[in-house]
Every structure is written in structure tokens, then in C-alpha cells.
Image (cartoon, rainbow, N blue to C red):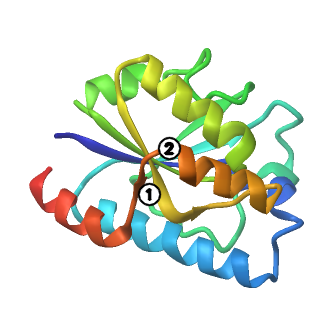
Amino acid sequence: MGLALLIIDVQKEYMKEHLGTKVFEETLLYINATAKLFRQANLPVIKVKDISEGDGPEYDFIDELDKHPNDIEIQKTKGNAFWKTNLDDLLKEKQVSYVVLSGTAAEHCVLATYNGAAERGYRPMMLQHGVFATHERGLLDLFWNRPLVSYTALTYMVKKA
């Protein structure tokens, strides 16, 4: 059971509306803690960067997102992080079956990547408390209709991976 964590579009330009909010702090706490858990188990942490609107400094990952030299970065130009990227090849090379999705935005790129993962035979899961949304309703809809995985469950799964 190979696991990988995807952190999608947690970039300065896309996080402006969330900065300084309680939701921002709590969601980022879950993403960073989960990334640390994966890194400690030598499991892939893949940061997905959307460059469809540009690749200047405003599209860099936010400073609050923990960084590690072993993190893998891929760039995408569409909502689905699998579309015309090397993500599928990378996950196959690392023998990943389960993909944990986090980042922004629930209604857009996270959902598109979830669908892309499922279409390619992966078992995608949303990180509970680890996804931002443009609208709260979008987040609730995503969580009601897609499998969630908690940090606690991941601590067990990581030991089994």
C-alpha cells in the first residue's frame, strides 16, 4: 500500500483571501503536520504548483507552508494535476496506490485532481481539515461526497505502508 500526499496550489496568489484567518491557520496546521508525518516515513510529499496564470513570485508557495528538500514539485496548467504532467508516472514509479489530497480549492483543482486520480486507478482521499475552499458550501459538498481521511487514521496507515 503506497501512499503519497499531494499539496495542491497552496500559492500566494491563490491564498490571499485566506491569509490571517482562523481557517487558514487550522487548515495549514493539518497540511504541515501531515507532510511531516509522510516525510518521517519516507513517503512522497508532492507539491503541485499552478502556473496557468503565471510563474512569478506571487505564484510561489506561501511562506507558511513547510518546505523540505525531498519534497517533489510538479507544475500544472490545468485544474487536474494529472493533465499533461508527469504525476502519473511519478506515482507509478514510487508504487503509490493511495493519494491523499490537500490544498486549494475544494471546488476546483482539488476536485479535478481527485477525479483524475480515480480515473487512473488510484484510491484518492481528502485530508480531513486539510482542504481550503472558495465557498464553505463547496467544502461541505466535497467532504460529504468524497472519502475523507483523518490525521489519526493516516498515522496508522503510514506505519503499514
Rendered location of residue 18, percent (x, y): 81, 70
Rendered location of residue 27, percent (x, y): 61, 72
Q: Amino acid at mark 2?
A: Arg
Instruction: Tell me: residue 128, above or below residue 26.
Output: above
Q: Which residue is mark 1?
A: 69
Rendered location of residue 15, percent (x, y): 80, 62
Q: Which mark is residue 146?
A: 2
**Which sits in the foreground, 70 or 120?**
120
Q: What is the secondary structure assignment of the residue under circle 1? A: loop
Mark 1 vs 2, N-terminal side: 1
User: Which quarter of the figure has residue 152?
Assistant: bottom left
> Could you classify mark 2 by the number of other residues whose Cα lies within 10 Å: few (under 14), some (14-19), or many (20 or more)?
few
Horizontal placement of 138 versus 17: left or right?
A: left
Horizontal placement of 14 versus 68: left or right?
A: right
Q: Amino acid at mark 1?
A: Pro
| Residue beneath the point at 55% across and 23% down | 82
| Residue beneath the point at 48% across and 63% down | 128
